Amino acid sequence: MSVARRSVLQAGLAAGAFSLFGRGPAFAAAPALDAKLIAAAKKEGAINVIALPRDWANWGATMDRFQELYGVKLDSANPDGSSAEELQAIRTLKSQSRAPDVVDVGPAFAVSGTKEKLFMPYKVATWADIPADTKDKDGHYCGDYYGVTAFAANKAVVKNMPQTWADLKKPEYKGMIALNGNPLSAGSAIGAVFAAALANGGSFDNVLPGVEFFAELAKIGNFSPSKAGAASLVAGQTPITIDWDYLSLGYKQANASKAEIEVAVPAGAQPFGNYYCMAISAHAPHPANAKLWMEYVYSDEGQLAFLGGFAHPIRFNALVAAGKVPDAVLKTLPPAAAYKDIKFASLAQSDAAKKVIADAWPRLVKV
């Protein structure tokens, strides 16, 4: 989790971004979780989490609410830590009292941690709602929230918001389209190439059409090599950016007084998403609290809290289908239908795609 991305969400929340535990609808009662598990957790009295910045994905509100509901002391270590550091903390601290009980890591680290037997298998009550391609079949880890590749546009410069990938080829967008970084190294940009591939005859196993799409945008003069971000979008220097939806929504909210930003998930194509995974340490010093934390995070209340930080809960589609996402929340997001068919690349597919991009992007995309 980069400092730059966290600061965007922090600014968005400070500016009044939607918070389910702040200005948004409040929950009247605690989730109905297992009474015996709650009792065991209270007896332990504490839980250790790691690498959960308070201003990222609304984790601050989630941590506060957990302590309020269950009366346990929550210790949050190394909030700016990386996935690699989380796994190292499990290895180094083992079952010391300050060792992490739960971790929140990228998919590659979730897989490697499982192979290394660093995680305790556990399936939450809402396990069936979690997409199969984001969880370990034996319960060693599961996705908790995700983002989707989306377009963002500064309406002072962009008169007509692009709605599809094909729209980006229109002459009116000459020199306007930029990525958040280079796809040779930046995850957001890799996601954009993946998403473009899915919209242009490619697949999770064939990302080359995505590179070719950007090569065409560069050839006709619509693609800019400038690195896109909040400042360049708001200033109109990169008036159309392709980035994760939660980042663009954060830019929009944080800069509402400076610019009119519109965000859209491209229509007519398979959406591309990326997610984080939660797991319980195999050496958790507070195993009951670790399980209770998981149950809370994957409960309706815990999942809806992610929307306070513009991240999508992994159970989003199931919650929408059940009518459990408040209309006030849905209005802050692109239409829910844009996320209906969300699927995720496997680790093997992601690794293969990076190799194709590393070879083809320098050869084909000339800017």
Image: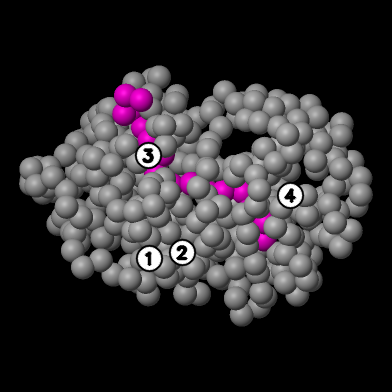
- Tell me which residue sits at (45%, 41%) in the image: 276
| Residue at the spot of label 1 | 326
Q: How is the image coloured?
A: one colour
Label 4 is placed on what type of residue?
Answer: Trp
In the displayed structure, does residue 82 sit left or right of residue 95?
right
Q: Are marks 2 and 1 in contact (CB under 8 Å)?
A: yes
Q: Which residue does the numbered mark 3 point to in the structure image?
A: 130
Give the Cα separation between the discs numbered 2 and 3. 20 Å
Mark 2 or mark 3, earlier in chain: 3
* Residue lying at 48% horizontally and 59% vertically, measured from the top left: 310
**Left or right relative to 67: residue 185:** right
Q: What's the distance in space between the residues labelled 1 and 4, CA to CA?
A: 30 Å
Residue 196 coordinates in the image, percent (x, y): 71, 42
* 10 Å crowding of disc 3: few (<14), some (14-19), many (20+): many
Q: Quadrant of residue 26?
A: bottom left
Q: Secondary structure at mark 2?
A: helix
| Front in this rendered view, residue 345 or 76 | 345
- Which disc number belongs to residue 330? 2
Residue under circle 4?
165
Does the magenta portion include 147?
yes
| Mark closer to the chain start, 1 or 4 | 4
**Disc assigned to residue 113:** none
Magenta stretch secondary structure, dominant: strand
Amino acid type at circle 1 is: Pro
Q: Is residue 353 above or below residue 253?
A: above
